Amino acid sequence: MKPAVIKLERTHQRWATMSVATIRMPDGTTVVRDVEDHGCAAAVLPYDPLRRTALLVEQLRAAQLVAVGATQSLEAIAGLVEGEDGSVATAKREAFEEGGLRLGALEHVATAWTMPGVSTERMTLYLAEYRAEDRVGDGGGVAHEDEELRVVEMSLKDLGAAMAAQEVVDMKTLVLVQALRLRRPDLFDWIAPPVGAGLSSPRS
């Protein structure tokens, strides 16, 4: 016999739904667990292989403020999958709304549970190339959602250094930056040529 949910009692519903699940275990005993549900999500780390930059956002996260007093969080662009949108459409929409970016092809990294001990959220992670001319808007998020985002474009060298200094503490961002470092280490190790020297094309 496999574990089975025999009762799901909703206790709170606003942006997220909180429920208490009663689960029957294989030996016939029951356990009670809290479950949070707010849907699935997608995240993308846009990077420019020519200028060797990445585009992220900085924002206030209430949970971090409550837990440790942090007022800003540097993160990859992300958002909830809404309606009939898939994760690709969500990542592209959020890239435009939050970063003012028009993205083309996305490179899938993983689809993973973000906090399986309590949440039903699965997040699909992407990398995406962009160029300077793809910055077609101001970004900053949607006004009526009170996101208060600041767009941050930084060199991949500086982003790697920030990770090494433990200044990047958001899990999805850590995964995406590390994935990019594994796939394109040349973008992080590259040293700028002298002024006036030609810029070589990055390796494909």
Image (cartoon, rainbow, N blue to C red):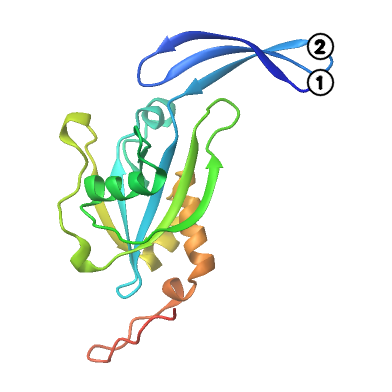
Residue occupying the point 31% across, 50% down: 92
Where is the C terminus found, in terms of image quarters? Answer: bottom left
SS at mark 2?
A: loop
Q: Which residue does the numbered mark 1 point to in the structure image? A: 1
**Neighbour class for label 1 at 10 Å: few (<14), some, many (≥20)?**
few
Instruction: Residue under label 2, please give it.
Output: 28
Tell me which label, 2 or 1, sits earlier in the chain: 1
> Measured from the top left, where is residue 78 in percent x and y?
36, 43
Q: Which residue sits at x=71%, y=12%?
A: 31
Q: Position of residue 170 (x, y in %)?
A: 45, 44
The quadrant in which the N terminus is found is: top right
Q: Is residue 15 above or below residue 189?
A: above
Whether pointer 2 and pointer 1 mark residues with C-beta atoms closer than 8 Å, the reply is yes
**Alpha-carbon span between mark 2 and mark 1:** 9 Å
Mark 1 secondary-structure assignment:
loop
Residue positioned 31% across, 36% down in the render: 71
Which marked residue is nearer to the observer: mark 2 or mark 1? 1
| Amino acid type, mark 1 | Met
Asked whether 146 or 126 is in front, the reply is 126
* Residue found farthest to the right: 27
Question: Is 80 positioned to the left or the right of 33 in the image?
Answer: left
51 relative position to 110: left or right: left
Looking at numbered disc 2 in the image, what kind of residue is underneath it? Gly
Q: Is residue 76 above or below residue 136?
A: above
Residue 165 showing in the rendered view: no
Q: Residue at x 22, y 45 (%)?
A: 97
For the residue pair 59 and 111, the one nearer the viewer reads as 111
Q: Position of residue 72 (x, y in %)?
A: 32, 40
Residue 109 seen in the figure? yes
